[in-house]
Amino acid sequence: MRAGMLALAAGLLLLRFLPQLPSFGWLLALALVGLLLLPFRWRPLAFFLFGLVWACLNAQWALDDRLPVDLDGRTFWLEGQVTGLPDRRGDVVRFELEDIHSRHAGLPSRIRLAWYGGPEIRSGERWRLAARLKRPSGMVNPSAFDYEAWLLARRIGATGTIKAGERVAEAASSGAWRDRLRQRLLTVEAHGRAGAIAALVVGDGSGLSTADWRVLQDTGTVHLMVISGQHVGMLAGLLYALVLLLARWGIWPQRLPWLPWACGLAF
């Protein structure tokens, strides 16, 4: 099974080195070959082919969900739900929109929008917007951030700027709690480090300044702040809930004198 999982991962990674995506006929043939090899000793090769086929299909689905060329640069009225954490920097707020409805066919299922001088946007809200959309694009400089690849990885089929809009429903989705928690953390008096606390707890780096990002990049700790830090925060919350529960049961700390030391060792 371990060899099969490694072969599956190798098949998924191979997509990164292909000059172009295989046609659907080739993918179907590879999948059939994998099914034929599955009952025999060549099972790792079958998992390798399954990984390659799955990666190519997902890449093709993401490409097919992009804004059509004939709609590039046009303005549309659309309605959708804000997802993720809106990012406000200065007077610009950027956010992603899903569950999109419009009179025009062919719009992607997820778009990223920028609203200059826009109001406060909360995750989970539904908005009706007039937005000028364009196909995903980015710089091709070898040392620059590959914005187009980042959009493709997040399955964002279009970007755009908002001309006008109105809120049609308040936040009601299950994912809105993360945005509410972030807003509470950003209002905490933390000697100017509220943005860093939000990054550690919910993985949102919008509250970090340019100087903060430069320090994190120079020290190689970006992942520790925005990704691993969130995991540490989850573990700390779990341990806090455990200690609180034990205290209510009356078995803390007399019967478990070693638990504070263990909690400190975990961090």
Image: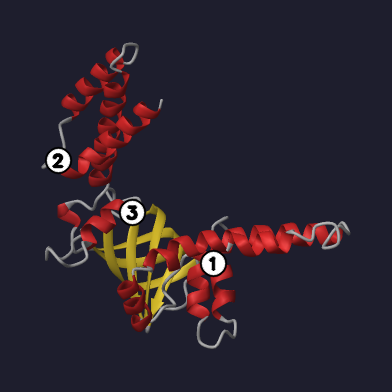
- Inter-mark Cα distance, 2 to 1: 37 Å
> Residue 84, image x and y in percent?
45, 61
User: Residue at the bottom extreme?
Assistant: 191
Instruction: Kindly state the secondary structure of the residue where label 3 is placed.
Output: loop
Quadrant placement of the C terminus: bottom right
- Inter-mark Cα distance, 3 to 2: 20 Å
Where is mark 2, residue-wise? 18
Label 2 amino acid? Leu
Label 3 amino acid? Arg
What residue do we see at 67% from left, 59% from top?
Answer: 262
Q: Earlier in the sequence, mark 3 or mark 2?
A: 2
What residue do we see at 21% from left, 27% from top?
Answer: 27
How crowded pointer 3 is (Cα within 10 Å; few <14, some 14-19, many 20+) is rated as few
Residue 124 in view in this figure: no
Q: Earlier in the sequence, mark 2 or mark 1?
A: 2
Residue 166 higher or lower than 84, as above or below:
below
Please name whichever residue, 79 or 220, is drawn nearer the observer in this view of the structure: 220
Q: Is residue 64 toward the left or the right of residue 249 in the image?
A: left
Q: Quadrant of residue 11?
A: top left
Please name whichever residue, 162 or 211, is drawn nearer the observer in this view of the structure: 211
Please name whichever residue, 249 or 157, is drawn nearer the observer in this view of the structure: 249
- On residue 154, the disc is 3
Residue 213 higher or lower than 169, as above or below:
below
